[in-house]
Image (cartoon, rainbow, N blue to C red):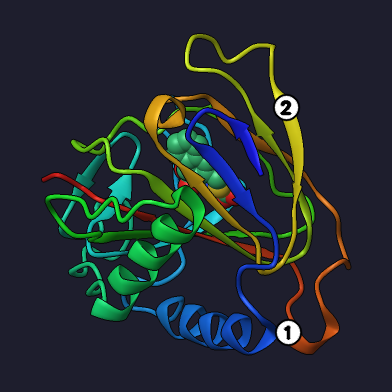
Amino acid sequence: TEIAPGAVHVPDWLDTGRQRELLHACREWARPPAGLRTVRTPGGGTMTARQVCLGWHWYPYAYARTVVDGDGAPVKPFPAWLADLARRAVTDALGTDAAPETPYDIALINFYDSDARMGMHRDADEDSDAPVVSLSLGDTCVFRFGNPRTRARPYTDVELRSGDLFVFGGPSRLSYHGVPRVHAGTAPSELKLTGRLNITLRVSGL
Ligand code: MD3
Ligand code: FE
């Protein structure tokens, strides 16, 4: 379903087996060093979703090769199978083999407990207009998709469920978006996951 030009939602893109594999990988990546972190913003705020990065380390609002706001460890490698997964996702969602000049090389993995939120923001720290690929695991959330001009209305609220794919390319690449709410206890029981994981795959252009 195209919810805006270049913003395509593919419900249930990952079957249960793939979800379990991805969750297992996320649990490994979440372990120190350079594991799951609490991100602090320059204004003194704390993000409620905790994060682990692969390929490049993100901190508000830039990329680095080492963990700037944590243990200083080198960032974890971005595996080739995730780059393949990102390309398949873009092909399936947009119907074109939009192979970027440079391969997918960043994963940002956000973990939400039932109280976590993400305020309206846009992702402008990459130096590439390649689509962002988003994969959801665990609890259902309300995803708020805005517009490229302002963090205020108009926006569209969409529920993202475990296994869903969302691709944001073209005119939607710089749109404001956020996660106003997570529905506790809605994860598929086979996953044995309390909370929500979102994996975004990106091209750094760096
Ligand atoms: C639209 N993550 O990591 S996923 C983020 O569920 C982020 O964790 C949210 O916003 C989450 O930056 C939303 C959907 C998403 C991700 C990246 C986008 C939508 C996007 C980049 C550009 C436009
Ligand atoms: Fe974002």
Q: Which residue has dot 1 on it?
A: 191
Residue 31's image quarter?
A: bottom left
Residue at image coords 29%, 69%: 83
Label 2: how many Cα within 10 Å (few below 14, some 14–19, many 20+): some
The answer to whether 174 is drawn above or below residue 151 in the figure is: below
Instruction: Tell me the tag on residue 135.
Output: none
- Observer-nearest of 18 and 106: 18
Q: Disc 2 and disc 1: Cα gap in Å? A: 28 Å
- Observer-nearest of 18 and 40: 18
Disc 2 or 1, which lies upstream in sequence? 2
Instruction: Tell me the tag on residue 156.
Output: 2
Whether residue 42 appears in this view of the structure is no
Whether residue 97 appears in this view of the structure is yes
Q: Name the quadrant of the C terminus.
A: top left
Q: Position of residue 154 (x, y in %)?
A: 69, 13
Residue labelled 2 has its Cβ within 8 Å of some atom of ligand 1: no
- C-beta proximity under 8 Å, tags 2 and 1: no
Q: What's the residue type where badge 2 is placed?
A: Thr
- Observer-nearest of 67 and 106: 106
Q: Position of residue 14 (x, y in %)?
A: 61, 74
Q: What's the residue type where badge 1 is placed?
A: Leu
Residue 102's image quarter?
A: bottom left
Residue at image coords 44%, 85%: 28
Q: Position of residue 36 (x, y in %)?
A: 46, 67
User: Total number of numbered labels?
Assistant: 2
Residue labelled 1 has its Cβ within 8 Å of some atom of ligand 1: no
Label 1: how many Cα within 10 Å (few below 14, some 14–19, many 20+): some
Side of 127 where 159 appears, left or right: right
The answer to whether 34 is drawn above or below residue 28 in the figure is: above
* SS class, disc 2: strand
Q: Name the quadrant of the N terminus.
A: top right
Q: Position of residue 194 (x, y in %)?
A: 76, 73
